[in-house]
C-alpha cells in the first residue's frame, strides 16, 4: 500500500522516585495519514550514549504503545536524549508529519530529531 504513517500522538510521563531517581515513560500512537490506527507497528527508541541503548514496543489495536526508560539519576544524568523510529506494514513512516511538540516542531523530525528528557 502507498499509505504514509506518522506518530499522531505522543506523551512523556516522568516521575521522581523516593530515592531521587527519575522514571520516564513515553506513550506513542501511530496512525496512517488517512487516520487508520496502525496495529502491529514497531516503535523503537534510542537513548543514552556509550553505548546507545534501544528499546521498542508494538502498537495495540488502538495504534498505541508505551516504552519505559531505565531509571536515571538526575545528579549524574541531568537529561537523556531520545530518538525514535517506526516500522509499519501499513505504509512508509514520515517523521516530518509527526505530532508537533510545544515549540511547534514535529517530534523526531529532521528539524528536531531528538527529544530531551529531564526531571
Image (tube, rainbow, N blue to C red):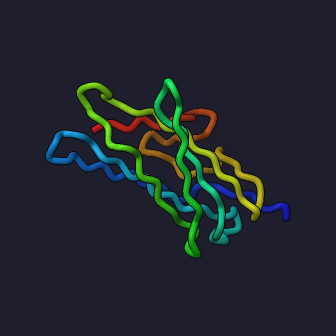
Q: Residue at x 78, y 62 (%)?
A: 3
Residue nearer the viewer, 32 or 90 = 90
Q: Nearer the viewer, residue 91 or 111?
A: 91
- Residue 28: horizontal and vertical position, in percent? 51, 58
Across and down, in percent, residue 47 comes to: 49, 36
Furthest-right residue in this view: 1
The residue shown at (64%, 70%) is 39
> Quadrant of the rendered structure where residue 1 is?
bottom right
Residue at x 58%, y 65% (from the top left corner)? 59
Residue furthest to the left: 18
Extreme-bottom residue of the structure: 61
In this rendering, the count of numbered labels is: 0
Q: Is residue 86 above or below residue 119?
A: below
Q: Residue 75 location, x and y as percent?
A: 23, 27
Left or right: 79, with 93 as reference point = left
Of residues 75 and 32, the one drawn nearer to the viewer in this rendering = 75
In this rendering, is residue 67 above or below 113? Answer: below
The picture places residue 109, in percent across and down from the top left corner, at 61, 40
Seen at 77% across and 59% down, the residue is 91
Q: Is residue 31 left or right of residue 51?
A: right
Residue 110 relative to residue 4: left or right: left
In front: 103, or 36?
36
Quarter that holds the C terminus: top left
Q: Is residue 106 above or below residue 40?
A: above
Amino acid at each position: 500500500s502507498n499509505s504514509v504513517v506518522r506518530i499522531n500522538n505522543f506523551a512523556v510521563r516522568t516521575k521522581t522516585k523516593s530515592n531521587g531517581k527519575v522514571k520516564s515513560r513515553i506513550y506513542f500512537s501511530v496512525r496512517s495519514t488517512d487516520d487508520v490506527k496502525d496495529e502491529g507497528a514497531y516503535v523503537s527508541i534510542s537513548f543514552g550514549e556509550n553505548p546507545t541503548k534501544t528499546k521498542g514496543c508494538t502498537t495495540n489495536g488502538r495504534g498505541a504503545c508505551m516504552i519505559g526508560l531505565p531509571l536515571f539519576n538526575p545528579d549524574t544524568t541531568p537529561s537523556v536524549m531520545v530518538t525514535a523510529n517506526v516500522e509499519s506494514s501499513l505504509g512508509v513512516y514520515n517523521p516530518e508529519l509527526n505530532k508537533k511538540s510545544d515549540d511547534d516542531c514535529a517530534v523526531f523530525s529532521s528539524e528536531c530529531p531528538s527529544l530531551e528528557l529531564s526531571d
